[in-house]
Image: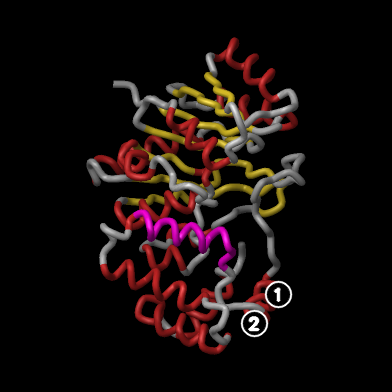
Amino acid sequence: MKNIVSIAIATYNGEKFLKEQLDSIYGQTYKEIEVIVCDDCSTDGTVEILDNYSKIYGLKYIINSSQLGSVKTFERAVSFCKTNYYALSDQDDVWLPNKIETLIQQMLITEQTYPNQPIIVHHDVFIVDKDLKNINKKFLYNDGKTSGFKNMLFSNAKIQGAATLFNKQLKDLSFPFPDNIPLHDLYLSYICETFGKRIYITQPLMLYRQHDNNQIGAEIISRGKRIRNFFQTKVILANDNEKSTVRQFYYQFNNVLKIKDKNIINNYFSILDFNTSLVLKLYKVIKFQFNSSGSVLKLIIKIIRSSIY
């Protein structure tokens, strides 16, 4: 049986970089793919590009009747996928040729070890500028290996949506997304970390393009700025989107979460309470993480390193 991978793309006014991304997708060494695109009412030449690739490669595309935003547009694209494996793609990156082959091989190995479980496989990326010139060699470094729901919340082990492959079990558990969820990739990672298995590949398999029109993008912060942020603002620099995603995850799965996971989330928000002093936040993080983090010094270093978003 062929293991076809569905590649779901959300587009909006992406004509500048879309051809380059589609060429990298159709240039994959793994050929058993289908490409499903949902367009969020583009007003430039995006749809014309999609129509051309539809005629040449069989790409399938749907146009929203009204703007839904990127999260719901991704959700709608996935809803038209009929296979057992799903990869999300942004409209402006470039995939390295062996990306899908590497991910599906790891997925099949993991499914043999953990049958019928939700699984997500993700990889590191090279961060590049609009002209694909290198900005940062890697995005996650070794932090992507961090495992466990608690460590996922309190580390820089963030999953970049376009660097993932997930199976039908995770799709069935995660979709449809809750209304107004801001970070679908983080939401998927919390579900998989709690109820399934997450596998991190240290090899960068994508050029993650940064440009003026990125919806989110990756902020490159110097070590000195991280330390200043750490001491001048708050212990953990979780932004509003991340906190909102944690809340949505909690509300969605409250009835099936284990007590220990509920306690982790309650501690997370207790630490992030803006009414809590910096010293008390630091004390709470150390108390909360100490058993799994080794020495206090190592923990403080880890917190500072995790303050990049």
Q: Which element is circle 1 on?
A: helix
Magenta range: 238-252
Residue 83, image x, y percentages: 37, 26
Main SS, magenta residues: helix
Amino acid type at mark 1: Gly
Q: Which element is circle 2 on?
A: helix
Residue 125, image x, y percentages: 58, 47
Residue 157 sits above or below residue 4 on the image:
below
Q: For the point 26% across and 64% down, which residue is it? A: 258
Q: Would residue 242 be found to the left or right of residue 81 on screen? A: right
Q: Quadrant of residue 257?
A: bottom left
Q: For the point 53% across and 75% down, which residue is it? A: 303
Q: For the point 33% across and 44% down, which residue is it? A: 173
Q: Is residue 196 magenta?
A: no
Q: Quadrant of the C terminus?
A: bottom right
Residue linked to disc 2: 231
In front here: 180 or 26?
180
Residue 4, image x, y percentages: 39, 25
Find residue 224 and name its label: 1
